[in-house]
Amino acid sequence: DVTLIVVTKTYPLSDVEILYELGVRNFGENRDQEGSEKAPKLPSDCVWHFQGQIQGNKLKSIVEWANVIHSLDDLEHARKINKLVTKPFKVFVQVSLDGLEHRGGVSPSQLSNFLDEIVEIPMIEPIGLMAVAPLNESPDSAFARLAEIKSGAEAQFPQIKFLSAGMSHDYQSAIKHGATHIRIGSSILGERPPLI
């Protein structure tokens, strides 16, 4: 049972409205500015997923329009969310598969300690792991590693049930290795418009 999240970053609101009419309810945005503009204009049965790198000063806005964050990798951000929300907020913890800081993610060796801290924060509801396959590794190899990491995390923390992995070019491999949420943009909406 795989949840399709259509990534609408850089695409206009009109595209999102067409997708809604076609039955899509899960939408992904990487930038607060776009998500905060689009989300209020769609019906309330939509689920909005924030999957970009988190900037602390944008969190107040992000938790107002997003229903789920896929890229939590910083305890300070978790503590800030805890103070901003009035009911438990769903998060995926981002895991780094390549160790590159600029791409974000908790290192696999630190994941257990990170989750130990996260589960103690009252308004944070960790539901799974998220990762992006490294550029210099085959998706099959990367997602096989990710599946092992997720299995270990779920054994220790049963609430880590879901796996957010796979984009337009590698989602089939991600599903093969247990992805429950895939984040697809260009395969559905066509070539991405240039960023303004």
Image (tube, rainbow, N blue to C red):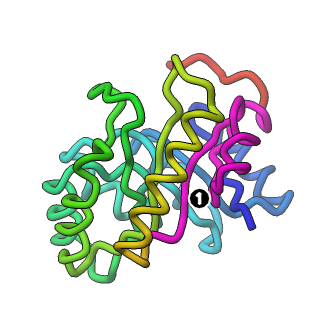
Quarter of the figure that contains the N terminus? bottom right
Indicate yes or no whether the magenta region holds residue 27: no
**Picture quadrant of residue 78:** bottom left
- Which one is in front, 157 or 73? 157
Residue 66 visible to an observer of this rendering: no
Callout 1 environment at 10 Å: few (<14), some (14 to 19), or many (20+)?
few
Please name the residue shown 17% across and 67% down the image. 117
Please name the residue shown 20% across and 55% down the image. 77
User: What residue is shown with label 1?
Assistant: 41
User: x, y (%) of residue 147?
Assistant: 54, 52
**Picture quadrant of residue 121:** bottom left
Local secondary structure at mark 1: helix
Residue range corresponding to the magenta coloring: 160-189
Please name the residue shown 17% across and 56% down the image. 75
What is the number of callouts on the image? 1
User: x, y (%) of residue 66?
Assistant: 45, 60
On screen, residue 162 above or below 173: below
**Picture quadrant of residue 167:** top right
Amino acid type at circle 1 is Lys
On screen, residue 125 above or below 7: below
On screen, residue 103 above or below 26: above
Residue 147 located left or right of residue 12: left
Q: Residue furthest right?
A: 22
Residue 145 located left or right of residue 88: right
- Which one is in front, 174 or 59? 174
User: x, y (%) of residue 116?
Assistant: 21, 69
Residue 97 located left or right of residue 99: right
Please name the residue shown 59% across and 16% down the image. 194
Indicate yes or no whether the magenta region holds residue 180: yes
